[in-house]
Image: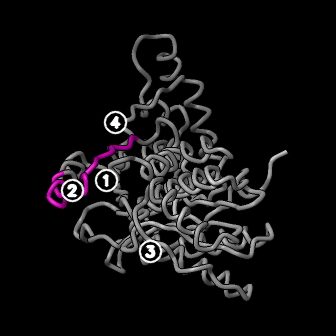
């Protein structure tokens, strides 16, 4: 048989050889090896067995041409620091599978002209899909609908409701943070957060106030807005402790702010979490694990967002409806020593 001639010879086994050995067409063999749903289970098993017997090594370029794909996805970001895009990228790569799909990462650096240049460069590489990642959760301009590939927006939603956007649920994150503090017996809760122009800041405040209202409580003082920094966390917490010395928790709009709050509490002789609890947002590993005590934080599940985006691209490539609108991803609470004492 043809396959047997190739096994011991120097000529590479081809998809045609596998198809002939399995008694199917080349198209059917290709679909079976690519896991397409149009192939019956017994036929797929026969093709896979033939491929194994012949020691068939797929030609990835040929595979891509057969199904009209290049096996590449573009990830276009404006997140200069990589704080948000890296976990999203990791989640997408997990969903795509190691070695199966290559991800081209392009940083537009927050510049519209550069973004258009990067977009054209990705399309010129014939990517199969695009994942557009913003640097903050505010709405961003759509890249348009005349593109030849499916597009999913992650973290920052598109301003066009016809686009598909996957974003963290920051309102739920605010609720979750306050509910945790309440469950720890805290009743005098103050809130220090970042730039008020950020949607994330406003959404987290909204969720926090909803949770306090449901418990019949109010925030101590006004929401304190400024920059997303440890310095602001230190300064704001010093003001809070002077004005309201009986507060028993500081809800911080980011892990950076929370690190600053921990510094001030320690400097003023307040025990954390005995006298005062501190909680942050983002679950940024460098911040939370290097804090003393380690910082309780609300994780926005960015890796799961990246995984979901990749799955949506896959589904669209397989002919499923892309969907549209803004879809939120639930956060999760990661409890550490800044709210619950560690033994």
Report how far apart the C-alphas of labels 2 and 4 lie in the structure: 28 Å
Residue 323 numbered tag: 3
Compared with residue 137, is residue 77 higher up or lower down, i.e. above or below?
above
Q: Identify the residue position indicated by label 4 in the image.
A: 61
Q: Earlier in the sequence, mark 3 or mark 4?
A: 4
Query: Which secondary structure, mark 4?
Result: helix
Compared with residue 82, is residue 145 higher up or lower down, i.e. above or below?
below
Q: Residue at x 53, y 73 (%)?
A: 204
Locate the C terminus and report the quarter of the image it occupies: top right
Magenta region includes residue 111: yes
Q: Residue at x 49, y 55 (%)?
A: 306
Q: Bin the neighbour count of mark 1 within 10 Å (Cα to Cα): few under 14, some 14-19, many 20 and up.
A: many
Q: Bin the neighbour count of mark 4 within 10 Å (Cα to Cα): few under 14, some 14-19, many 20 and up.
A: few
Which stretch did the figure color magenta? Answer: 102-117
Q: Identify the residue position indicated by label 1 in the image.
A: 76
Report how far apart the C-alphas of labels 4 and 1 lie in the structure: 24 Å
Q: Nearer the viewer, residue 246 or 87?
A: 246
Q: Earlier in the sequence, mark 2 or mark 3?
A: 2
């Amino acid at each position: 048989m043809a396959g047997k001639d190739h096994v011991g010879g120097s000529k590479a086994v081809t998809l045609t050889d596998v198809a002939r050995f399995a008694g199917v067409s080349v198209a059917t063999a290709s679909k079976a090896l690519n896991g397409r749903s149009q192939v019956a289970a017994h036929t797929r098993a026969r093709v896979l067995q033939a491929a194994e017997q012949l020691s068939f090594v797929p030609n990835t370029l040929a595979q891509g041409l057969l199904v009209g794909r290049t096996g590449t996805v573009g990830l276009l970001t404006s997140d200069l620091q990589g704080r948000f895009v890296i976990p999203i990228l990791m989640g997408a790569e997990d969903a795509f599978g190691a070695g199966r799909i290559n991800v081209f990462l392009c940083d537009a650096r927050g510049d519209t002209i550069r973004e258009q240049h990067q977009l054209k460069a990705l399309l010129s590489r014939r990517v199969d899909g695009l994942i557009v990642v913003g640097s903050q959760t505010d709405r961003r301009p759509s890249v348009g609908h005349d593109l030849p590939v499916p597009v999913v927006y992650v973290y920052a939603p598109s301003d066009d409701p016809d686009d598909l956007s996957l974003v963290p649920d920051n309102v739920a994150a605010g609720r979750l943070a306050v509910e945790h503090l309440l469950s720890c017996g805290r009743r005098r809760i103050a809130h220090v957060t970042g730039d008020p122009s950020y949607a994330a800041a406003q959404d987290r405040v909204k969720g926090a106030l909803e949770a306090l209202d449901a418990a019949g409580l109010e925030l101590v003082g006004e929401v304190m807005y400024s920059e997303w920094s440890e310095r602001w966390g230190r300064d704001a917490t010093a003001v809070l402790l002077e004005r309201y010395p009986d507060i028993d928790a500081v809800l911080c709009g980011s892990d950076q702010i929370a690190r600053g709050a921990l510094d001030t509490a320690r400097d003023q002789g307040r025990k954390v979490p005995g006298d005062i609890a501190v909680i942050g947002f983002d679950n940024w590993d460098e911040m939370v694990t290097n804090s003393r005590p380690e910082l309780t934080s609300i994780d926005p599940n960015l890796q799961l967002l990246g995984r979901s985006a990749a799955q949506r691209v896959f589904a669209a490539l397989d002919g499923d409806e892309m969907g549209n609108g803004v879809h939120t991803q639930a956060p999760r609470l990661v409890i550490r020593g800044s709210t619950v004492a560690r033994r």
